[in-house]
Image: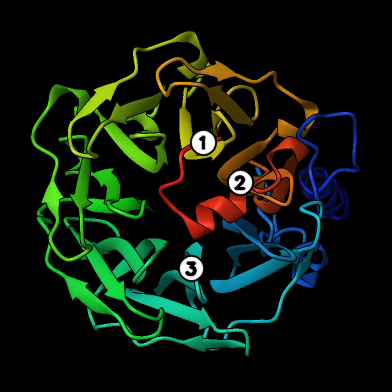
Amino acid sequence: MRPLAAIAVVLLTACGPVPPSADTWPRGEVEQPDAVTAEPSSTPAYCAPCHPAVITELRDVAALDDGFLAIGSRTPATGTLWRSADGRSWTLAEPLPDAAGARLEAVAIGQRTVVVGSIGPDPAIWVDDGDGWTRATVPRGQGRMTAVTATDDGFIAGGYLGPEFGPAGAAIWRSPDGTHWTPVDIPHRESRVAALAATASRLVAVGRASSDDGAASWASDDGVHWERSPVQASLDGALMLSVTPFGARWVAVGTTASGEEAAAWTSDDGLTWTRAPSQASFHSRSRYAPHAEMSDVTVARTRLVAVGWNSSGNGAAVVWTSTDGVTWTREPDEPGFSGGGMHAVTLGNGKLVAVGSTGWPDTHAATTWSHDTSEYVGLLHRRAVRPDAAPI
């Protein structure tokens, strides 16, 4: 047992943060809960592979005036926050109240900071108004909040109502202050919202229809009345995972329904979409269980930056860039990408910061990556003040 335990410790350590390097996207130094290193394996006998007793992952990240806030969870299910002043060194932040059993999914910064997710089978929200976190009141109902965005009028959250596995319906909630939430009636049958984005004049949500139908989107000019995307071939056999305004257009990213290839779309109104042609940068580099997905997308100056992962080798984080949302370039692989998967990316304080986990497919340790882009200073402020601001 001693050799097995030693091997498990080495594997877990290898999956953790690495020292800064010459990589253009170096991994950060992320503080892990003590239990991550104290209990290397949950299996007291032979195990292949061995799984740690505690795993951590990051699901979303937002830029603050004085640094960054990343959200995620650890096992047993507990919503967890990390903070960083520079996007490179991360420390565990103050615990959320009533976060036992919580899975955090998304964060938005407006007049307040809002984090959404779920506790057990029910949606859950936390709000920080500068004086600490409080648990918000959410209308009862089984489901999960998976997305949130700030607007001029408050906040919009999205997700689904129904079981985690099985038929569920897309859901949207509105709030003027992040504390009091009201459900909004939307075309919801057999669908789920995965992501939201807003300009000063329009809101767009993207996600999936039923497991067989493919991607779906919803759009609204006021946050109250929503229209669902019509049936169209461009949405068949795919899932939308993220969306962003880019100039006068919308760009969504995701993966094919089979998961074997990344996917991207462009739209003038958030309802009718043109799918980017299949291209080499979208393909998985694995012959065994191929998978490639763009998990999130953001705007950096005049280009789009998407992050995700692909199952080549032992899995690897991937970064793509595009100037039009149609043709995408896959950035060169780096040692710090190995074994990782990026869930989300944001721009702030002169840096692109991506978050996710490392250790696919058998272990997961919360991981961050950063990319210096000092020429982009000021863009975050413009998008916070005017969400409809075009790329500069």
- Give the secondary structure at mark 3: strand
Residue at the image point whose x is 69% and y is 18% from the top: 332
Residue 145 image point, x, y percent: 35, 66
Q: Amino acid at mark 1?
A: Pro
- Give the secondary structure at mark 2: helix
- What's the coloring here? rainbow
| Mark sitting earlier along the chain (3/2) | 3
Residue 100 image point, x, y percent: 53, 82
Q: CA distance from mark 2 to mark 1?
A: 8 Å
* Disc 3 + disc 2, Cβ < 8 Å: no
Q: Nearer the viewer, residue 51 or 390?
A: 390
Figure check: 362 above or below 53: above
Number of marks: 3
Residue under circle 1?
391
Residue under circle 3?
103
Q: Nearer the viewer, residue 316 or 389?
A: 389
Residue 86 image point, x, y percent: 81, 55
Is residue 136 rendered to the left or right of residue 382? Answer: left
* Disc 2 + disc 1, Cβ < 8 Å: yes
Residue 196 image point, x, y percent: 35, 53
